[in-house]
Image: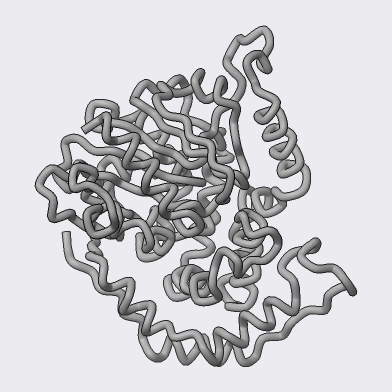
Amino acid sequence: MQRFKIEVSDSLLADLADRLARTRFPDQLEGAGWDYGTELSYLRELVAHWRSKYDWRAHERALNQFEHWKAKVRGLELHFIHQRSKEPGALPLVITHGWPGSVYEFHKIIGPLTDPVAHGGRKEDAFHVVCPSMPGYGWSEAPKQPGFDIKQVGETVAALMAELGYGRYGAQGGDWGAIATAWIGRVDPSHCAGIHMNMIVAGPPAGAANPMEGVTPQEMAWLGEMGNFQKNEVGYQQIQGTKPQTLGYGLNDSPAGLAAWIVEKFHGWSDCGGKIESRFSKDELLTNVMIYWITQSITSSTRLYCETMRAGRFGAAEGRIEVPTAGAIFAKELYKAPRKWAEAGFNLKQWSVFDRGGHFAALEEPKLLVDDVRKFFRELR
């Protein structure tokens, strides 16, 4: 296990600047807005900011304020932030990101979780926080052989916690991180005290005569929203789940193309009301994109879709998960299962529904997320 420092070479940044200067933008239909994907005028504006105002070195220094490590776990070199609390009774908590996110998603919540007193909380709610880059994401090594799916992500994260010597810990996640967290609860129940997810993936109860029994009118509306999402918003899943390599050639070669692919999701999946910068600054968007660019991890990141689809695991972990479970349901989350469905798949102990926030809860509504995590694990310490 070795300390790690983010250090991007000057030559890589010079190459990026050259590529951005030579961006060849496509045309766009009149009045199209974001209907056809990332809007042209916004991407031009973002690229101009990237070229002239964005300072990677400042964000690199900020990221390096956290304690970064690398360790060999189940044959892969895994990068992770390991931020220990000064409080002696702190509970270890592993937080797993998703796609198109990164460990940068958690830069607003690591401080409040590790040092609650400094952020208006109680010392009894302190956590030792571990934030791994999933294999094939960011600075973590990508699997070299086919078959590494989301179950193996969960197993690898659980193995990391064992490597760190944590005999009892909690787990949290959203997006892929939520599914990985569910797998952690399934494969490591003797050590995992509880799982908290801000996207619970659960289907209708098995064998239910009427799967809609107990589903509230609000939850029926959620199912309608999910149906619309499945109809209109999953093209990225299909290409990443079937031909990620072909997609990767373009995204790994063009920084503007990479930004367009990722930023569209932050626009469409957040509670921004169509105004992306009401939730994220340009610098926040670009720092997340930069992690994919400087590590050349976009292709390996998208392969997780392909491997998980081929394994038939593009959903919840098989069978009911018995470790204590919490669901934090933010207003604009992509997938919002009815509570009755979640109760059938998990040992549900806490269910929080928020009237704001979207898919990127740690960035959009850090206080709501932190408070909910504290509340849940308070009973499990």
| On screen, residue 145 above or below 181 | below
Q: Nearer the viewer, residue 297 or 217?
A: 217
From the viewer's perspective, tell me whether residue 193 is left or right of residue 163: right
| On screen, residue 51 above or below 73 | below
From the viewer's perspective, tell me whether residue 18 is left or right of residue 159: right
Asked whether residue 148 appears in the rendered view, the answer is: no
| On screen, residue 223 above or below 123 | above
| On screen, residue 230 above or below 61 | above
Residue found 70% across the figure and 48% down from its top? 234
Quadrant in the rendering for residue 294: bottom left
Asked whether residue 292 appears in the rendered view, the answer is: yes
Residue found 72% across the figure and 52% down from its top? 235
Quarter containing the C terminus: top left
Expressed as whole percent of the image width and height from the top left, the position of residue 182 reads 42, 34
Expressed as whole percent of the image width and height from the top left, the position of residue 345 reads 49, 22
From the viewer's perspective, tell me whether residue 108 is left or right of residue 257: left
Residue found 31% across the figure and 79% down from its top? 61
Quadrant in the rendering for residue 334: top right
